[in-house]
Image (tube, rainbow, N blue to C red):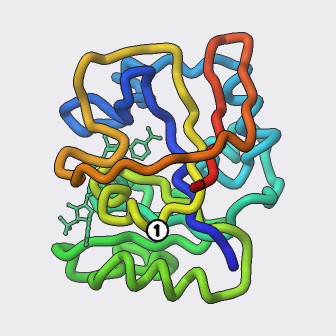
Amino acid sequence: MRKLVYYIAATLDGFIAGPDGADPTGPDGFWPIPDDYVQHLATEYPETLPAPAREALSVTAEGTHFDTVLEGRKSYEIGLDAGITDAYPHLRHLVFSTTLAESPDPAVELVTGDPVAKVRELKQEDGKDIWLIGGGELAGALYGEIDRLIVKLGPLTTGTGIPLFGRTAAFDPRVWNLTGHTVLDSGAAFLTYTRA
Ligand SMILES: NC(=O)c1ccc[n+]([C@@H]2O[C@H](COP(=O)([O-])OP(=O)(O)OC[C@H]3O[C@@H](n4cnc5c(N)ncnc54)[C@H](OP(=O)(O)O)[C@@H]3O)[C@@H](O)[C@H]2O)c1
């Protein structure tokens, strides 16, 4: 059965973004993206690069990990505000929201119902794994369904921000087995954990 994988960049203190919910890697962001990081993504996870980045880097590879991406409405709207209605046209793209009336792009599937039920349905289908891009609130809602974590641990701390599983996640300790790791010279660590 295909897995739900929360593949996410986090600070050393467990935050995925600043408190304002903006894109931390954008032009006004605080999160440096070194060249070896971009190269690692392009080589190992090309499908996780948004379309403008794929184009800029001349990346056309399909990738081996994911064929589907799940996104919370607030994360999706960061691209939307920049005029990008589908940052991942090379993947099946689902956005979760109870407030959007319709999808801004015919290729993006709007899910208004229970994310857990939708993920269980997706897991029954054939295909590659399912990438949960975030943000924290959607990840918190899907916490119990996550089979694997790929944390792209950045060499920075922020003190506060949006936590890995959002601001309202319940206390629910789980143990994970380390099943892969790559440390880049620039300081980021790609840590893969599978649910024990
Ligand atoms: N570090 C990284 O790799 C990474 C990756 C992705 C995003 N981010 C960052 O994450 C931040 C946004 O995260 P966030 O936690 O604020 O928001 P989010 O999870 O992206 O979106 C939250 C929205 O998703 C919908 N949603 C969440 N749970 C739901 C549920 N159980 N049922 C139905 N809909 C649900 C709701 O939309 P409605 O209000 O419309 O119902 C909710 O307001 C941004 O700053 C972004 O840059 C970082």
Image quarter in which the C terminus is found? bottom right
Q: Secondary structure at mark 1?
A: helix
* Quadrant of residue 99 within the rendered picture: bottom left
Nearest the camera: 167 or 57?
Answer: 167
Q: Is residue 52 visible?
A: no
Is the residue 24 above or below the residue 133 in the image? above
Nearest the camera: 19 or 181?
Answer: 181
Image quarter in which the N terminus is found? bottom right
Query: Could you tell me which residue is drawn at 45 percent across and 32 percent down?
Result: 10
Quick check: 22 left or right of 176?
Answer: left
Residue 33 appears at what percent x and percent y? 56, 21
Query: Could you tell me which residue is drawn at 62 percent across and 21 percent down?
Result: 188
* Quadrant of residue 152 within the rendered picture: top right
Residue 65 appears at what percent x and percent y? 74, 59
Residue with the mark numbered 1:
145
Is the residue 192 above or below the residue 29 in the image? below
Quadrant for ligand 1? bottom left
Task: Give neighbour class at mark 1: few <14, some 14-19, many 20+ (Cα, 10 Å).
Answer: many
Quick check: 193 left or right of 36?
Answer: left
Nearest the camera: 75 or 5?
Answer: 5
Is the residue 148 above or below the residue 144 in the image? above
Query: Could you tell me which residue is drawn at 44 percent across and 50 percent down?
Result: 174
Query: Could you tell me which residue is drawn at 47 percent across and 78 percent down?
Result: 119
Label 1 is placed on what type of residue? Answer: Glu
Residue 113 appears at what percent x and percent y? 28, 84
Nearest the camera: 23 or 186?
Answer: 186
